[in-house]
Image (spheres, helix red, strand yellow):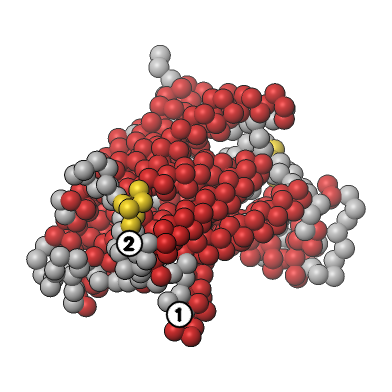
């Protein structure tokens, strides 16, 4: 007789009470749909965002600095909105239903963006050979569509990688190893989408038209939605654990209420549920740690903590696991902060690298010109190369020396990427020095393009791609593993906010640099005519900040203690 699925009280298939469920759901059979969805969704995102700076300049008539700042502001918002989606997922809907809801906002935004670039009356008018002069209504429609996409992506970004990792049982050693590999292939699928975006879609935008250039990514997003829902019967769903922010504030309030209470030397006397499971839905118990001892006061049990019939007031008494949740979040923050400068470096690919490429010879043969934004395909190629190399060769090799199951610890992996990013900025700066030397020696200040091939930019893109494989994938895995079980979407969103703040930091740096360097009638480091500027100084500034950031990261990572969980989530 065939065994029937056993469900938890929230309708989730329970893989522990009926082991047969484990064979039917999750693992790679579920992840193929998640990876397919992510590939198409990223194709849509990068197909629209990679060349955005050129659209703003050619169709909305914006200058270099304004266009670059608008791109980084929008991109930054795309990485702030995940905090909204993460909260909804962890507290109320769960990851599956949050993704299912927000994809429709995303598709609506992509559709409106396509209409704004193709429908007469909505698309920018008064165009000549080089630029258009849109009215305020046309500009408004474009930015409404852009920020609808930012909101839609906010429900997908923090959930999809965690949702994929949820398909592997952490209590099964074989599946636990596969989960680590999942993050590598998840990032690989992102870059397959990005590769198509940086080649085919950018070419369509520059040679066929922006209506088709935005229309194809919209279709890709619809395909992504289909991929996601096709896999529904294979997914393992984690139940939401209630508002994580409420639990955090309960610990803080309870600790301050007991400021004068002494924490017992014997930590086993601190309050914790008696059974093997945590009292937080979807979470395992966490082992007590000795850091941030002040918050242990929240778990000191007093007679006044009870309400009635043995129930406790959660604003007066919190379990050790709940206290450790807050400690885990606080411990993650220093590591999180060091990712901001790296994200600033990464954001240059869609702004300063593109503007630098615009001034160079883009010919590939006599008749074909490669759009400068398409050079980001070499970043993607680098990621597609290094991801399997890291998974199949570097990990086994490193394991022999480090004795680590994953080859490197997650913090070591991220640190390697930070070092590589420094060399990426130095390489970009050196290229700009060479380019400006040619301009100076040939008095070519007013030439739009100089006879220096754009392919000299390839090394800086390759280095950024290599750095991504180490830092961004390491960051994905680190924030998932070290997050409390019931706060994983929130912590994934937290890791994504480094990209947001990195983009905003780039905006601030450009604004401040231009304000300072334009004094006394000078053109500044990043003028509209880069031949009269010093973009090399800006790249060296980023290299210096990256080096200082790495020194801080070393100090932080040496003092970090990894999370320890016991038991099983319910």
Numbered label attached to residue 198 = none
Coordinates of residue 53 in the picture (x, y in percent): 32, 61
The quadrant of the image that shows the N terminus is top left
Query: Position of 44 compared to 118: left or right?
Result: right
Residue of label 1: 522
Q: Which residue is depicted at the point 57% across and 49% down?
A: 423
Q: Which residue is depicted at the point 70% across and 55% down?
A: 551
Q: Is residue 291 above or below residue 180?
A: below
Query: Position of 163 compared to 402: left or right?
Result: left
Cβ–Cβ under 8 Å for marks 2 and 1:
no
Coordinates of residue 214 in the picture (x, y in percent): 22, 53
Q: Is residue 39 above or below residue 123?
A: above
Q: Residue furthest bottom?
A: 520
Spatial CA distance of label 2 from label 1 is 24 Å
Secondary structure beneath dot 2 equals: helix
Question: In the depicted view, which residue is nearer to us: 295 or 182?
Answer: 182
Q: Residue furthest right?
A: 265
The reply to whether residue 159 is in sight is no
Q: Which residue is depicted at the point 24% across and 65% down?
A: 58
Query: Position of 342 compared to 403: left or right?
Result: left
Mark toward the start of the polypeptide (2 vs 1)? 2
Within the image, what quadrant is residue 57 found in?
bottom left
Residue of label 2: 53
Within the image, what quadrant is residue 474 found in?
top right
Within the image, what quadrant is residue 368 found in?
top left
Secondary structure beneath dot 1 equals: loop
């Amino acid at each position: 007789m065939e065994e029937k699925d056993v469900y938890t009280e929230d309708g989730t298939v329970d893989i522990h009470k009926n082991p047969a469920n484990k064979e039917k759901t999750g693992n790679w059979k579920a992840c193929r749909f998640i990876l397919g969805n992510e590939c198409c969704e990223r194709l849509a995102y990068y197909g629209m965002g990679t060349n955005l700076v050129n659209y703003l300049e050619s169709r909305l008539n914006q200058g270099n600095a304004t266009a670059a700042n608008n791109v980084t502001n929008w991109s930054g918002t795309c990485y702030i909105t995940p905090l909204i989606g993460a909260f909804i997922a962890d507290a109320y809907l769960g990851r599956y239903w949050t993704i299912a809801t927000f994809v429709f906002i995303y598709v609506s935004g992509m559709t409106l963006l396509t209409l704004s670039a193709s429908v007469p009356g909505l698309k920018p008018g008064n165009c000549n050979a080089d630029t258009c002069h849109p009215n305020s209504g046309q500009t408004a429609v474009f930015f409404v569509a852009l920020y609808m996409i930012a909101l839609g992506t906010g429900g997908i970004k923090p959930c999809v990688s965690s949702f994929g990792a949820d398909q592997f049982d952490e209590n099964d050693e074989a599946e636990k190893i596969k989960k680590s590999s999942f993050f590598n292939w998840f990032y690989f699928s992102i870059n397959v989408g990005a590769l198509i975006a940086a080649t085919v879609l950018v070419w369509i935008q520059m040679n066929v038209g922006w209506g088709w250039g935005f229309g194809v990514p919209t279709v890709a997003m619809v395909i992504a939605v289909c991929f996601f829902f096709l896999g529904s019967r294979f997914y393992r769903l984690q139940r939401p654990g209630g508002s994580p922010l409420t639990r955090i504030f309960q610990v803080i309030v309870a600790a301050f209420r007991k400021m004068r209470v002494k924490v017992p030397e014997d930590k086993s006397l601190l309050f914790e549920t008696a059974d093997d499971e945590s009292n937080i839905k979807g979470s395992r118990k966490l082992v007590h740690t000795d850091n941030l001892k002040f918050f242990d006061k929240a778990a000191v049990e007093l007679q006044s903590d009870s309400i009635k019939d043995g129930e406790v007031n959660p604003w007066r008494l919190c379990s050790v696991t709940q206290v450790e949740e807050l400690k885990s979040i606080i411990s993650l923050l220093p590591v999180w902060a060091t990712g901001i400068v790296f994200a600033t470096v990464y954001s240059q690919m869609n702004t300063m690298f593109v503007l630098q490429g615009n001034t160079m010879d883009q010919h590939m043969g006599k008749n074909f010109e490669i759009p400068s934004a398409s050079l980001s395909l070499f970043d993607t190629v680098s990621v597609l190369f290094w991801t399997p190399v890291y998974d199949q060769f570097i990990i086994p090799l490193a394991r022999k020396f480090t004795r680590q199951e994953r080859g490197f610890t997650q913090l070591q992996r991220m640190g390697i990427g930070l070092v590589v990013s420094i060399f990426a900025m130095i390489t970009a700066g050196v290229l700009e020095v060479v380019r400006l030397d040619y301009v100076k020696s040939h008095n070519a200040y007013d030439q739009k393009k100089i006879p220096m091939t754009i392919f000299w930019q390839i090394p800086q893109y390759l280095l950024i791609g290599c750095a991504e494989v180490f830092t961004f994938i390491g960051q994905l895995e680190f924030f998932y593993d070290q997050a409390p079980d019931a706060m994983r979407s929130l912590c994934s969103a937290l890791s994504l906010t480094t990209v947001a703040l990195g983009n905003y930091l780039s905006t601030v740096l450009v604004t401040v640099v231009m304000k300072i360097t334009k004094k006394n009638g000078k053109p500044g480091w990043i003028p509209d005519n880069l031949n009269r500027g010093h973009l090399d100084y800006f790249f060296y500034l980023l290299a210096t900040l990256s080096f200082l950031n790495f020194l801080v990261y070393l100090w932080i990572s040496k003092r970090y203690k990894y999370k320890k969980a016991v038991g099983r989530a319910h």
